[in-house]
């Protein structure tokens, strides 16, 4: 059977290996498996969220409130924007999909960082758009600008902090960059880890309200999958000019967010105490990763997120190290598919991190 030729060059997105799979493949007791592969919050989500979801579980038989008023109100209060500036997606992934489908076609170009979130390229291929990459690994805005002038892309993605490297762009520099871009080009700021970045350095804080007040061609993305600990609920949001939001809405399937997910996200947004505790623990534990890397003479990229990227020297092979860790029940991310001899490790709870230090030490000593 023949399929849409646009699908021919698409590699299926590789998610972090689920624990269930490791149990089956290696016969390891699920209790002994630690997953530090998908940048999930090791503390899970707020207890208030769990209680709220249990309270409304009987509403499962009804279709969700498709106006999503409760969550939109919570977001508009948080960010000081109007409901008409917000769209909710099944993860911010879905909003990336909407945005690319809304703006790009087979004659389009999409400019991204050399190493960045893999879904930009996958959705670009859906519409047959061409991906243009920088050479620099860390968002070099001068290089972005040069490529923008040469290539005239329809969309520019800036992932700050970036996944899988963890580096973040200074907000001032980001605003100066966008000011130089023509208003026909859509600039997408992916802030999946923004809460962490702000916790580390306010100079990295990109404020969606300020963005959309200054620029009509910017879409800001946020998610509940990372610091809010709701990866399994699939909720993300986009904030933009109301005209852009209207276009994205044309691509949205009805009821794209479940009743339980809408409730969970609304409550999660209001438990700031939980989020702040998680961020504090994250950076305390990150220091231990930095010390560990220093001691073992492994390069670590300065991170503004809940993960660290360890760049290995040529004595080691990241795929092999990831595999050996996996066989010992530790799931992390090999970055060889990004062209890096590196591994990405989500910062877990103290005991989980201890176990990682122990296992990696064992492996590199043998
Ligand atoms: C995790 C992540 C997302 C989106 O995750 P969803 O679960 O789809 O909301 C988007 N961008 C980056 C860079 C991410 O790391």
Image (tube, rainbow, N blue to C red):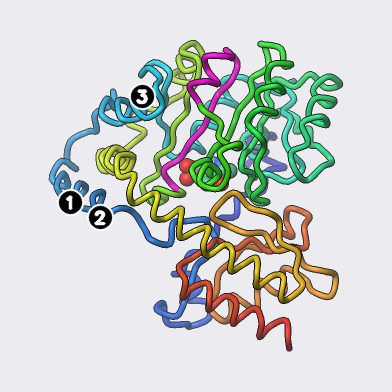
Q: Do callouts 1 and 3 mark residues in contact (Cβ within 8 Å)? A: no
Q: Is 277 placed left or right of 121 in the picture?
A: left
Q: Position of residue 174 (x, y in %)?
A: 67, 28
Q: Mark 1 or mark 3: which is in front?
A: 3
Q: Is 247 placed left or right of 84 in the picture?
A: right
Label 3 – label 2 distance at C-alpha: 23 Å
Q: Which residue lies at the image location 68% right of the left edge and 64% below the top edge?
A: 343
In the figure, residue 9 lies in which quadrant?
A: top right
Q: Mark 2 or mark 1: which is in front?
A: 2
Asked if residue 329 is positioned above or below residue 133 in the image, the reply reads below
Label 1 – label 3 distance at C-alpha: 25 Å
Q: Which residue lies at the image location 62% right of the left edge and 42% below the top edge?
A: 1
Q: Position of residue 318 (x, y in %)?
A: 73, 68
Name the element at disc 1. helix
Name the element at disc 2. helix
The residue segment tinted magenta is: 208-225
Q: Is residue 223 magenta?
A: yes
> Which numbered disc, 2 or 1, marks the residue that appears first in the sequence?
2
Q: Label 2, on which residue?
A: 47
In the figure, residue 123 lies in which quadrant?
A: top right
Asked if residue 301 is positioned above or below residue 113 in the image, the reply reads below
Q: Where is residue 169 in the image (x, y as percent from the top left)?
A: 67, 37
Q: Label 3, on which residue?
A: 76
Within 10 Å of the Cα at label 1, are there few (<14), some (14-19), or many (20+) other Cα atoms?
few
Q: Label 1, on which residue?
A: 54
Name the element at disc 3. helix
Q: Nearer the viewer, residue 63 or 212?
A: 212
Can you name the residue that lies furthest to the front here? 202
Q: Which residue lies at the image location 19% right of the left edge and 52% below the top edge?
A: 51
Circle number at residue 37: none
């Amino acid at each position: 059977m023949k399929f849409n030729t646009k699908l021919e060059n698409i590699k299926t997105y590789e998610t972090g290996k689920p624990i269930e799979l490791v149990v089956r493949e290696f016969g390891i007791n699920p209790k002994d498996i630690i997953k530090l592969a998908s940048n999930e919050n090791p503390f899970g989500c707020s207890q208030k969220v769990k209680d709220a979801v249990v309270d409304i579980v009987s509403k499962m038989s009804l279709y969700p409130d498709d106006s999503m008023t409760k969550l939109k109100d919570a977001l508009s209060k948080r960010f000081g924007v109007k409901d008409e500036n917000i769209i909710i997606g099944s993860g911010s992934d879905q909003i990336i999909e909407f945005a690319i489908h809304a703006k790009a076609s087979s004659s389009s170009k999409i400019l991204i960082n050399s190493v960045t979130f893999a879904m930009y390229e996958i959705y670009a291929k859906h519409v047959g758009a061409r991906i243009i990459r920088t050479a620099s690994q860390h968002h070099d805005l001068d290089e972005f600008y040069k490529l923008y002038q040469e290539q005239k892309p329809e969309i520019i993605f800036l992932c700050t902090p970036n996944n899988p490297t963890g580096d973040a762009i200074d907000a001032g520099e980001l605003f100066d960059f966008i000011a130089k871009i023509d208003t026909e080009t859509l600039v997408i700021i992916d802030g999946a880890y923004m809460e962490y970045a702000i916790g580390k350095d306010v100079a990295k804080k990109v404020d969606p309200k300020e963005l959309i007040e200054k620029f009509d061609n910017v879409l800001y993305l946020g998610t509940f999958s990372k610091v809010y600990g709701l990866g399994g609920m699939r909720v993300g949001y986009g904030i933009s000019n109301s005209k852009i939001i209207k276009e994205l809405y044309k691509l949205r399937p009805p009821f794209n967010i479940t009743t339980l997910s809408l409730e969970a996200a609304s409550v999660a947004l209001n438990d700031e105490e939980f989020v702040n505790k998680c961020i504090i623990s994250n950076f305390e534990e990150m220091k231990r990763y930095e010390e560990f890397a220093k001691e073992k003479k492994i390069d670590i990229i300065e991170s503004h997120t809940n993960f660290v990227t360890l760049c290995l020297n040529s004595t080691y092979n990241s795929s092999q190290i990831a595999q050996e860790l996996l066989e010992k029940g530790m799931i992390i991310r090999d970055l060889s598919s990004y062209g890096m001899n590196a591994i990405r490790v989500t910062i877990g709870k103290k005991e989980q991190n201890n176990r990682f230090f122990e296992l990696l030490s064992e492996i590199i000593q043998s």
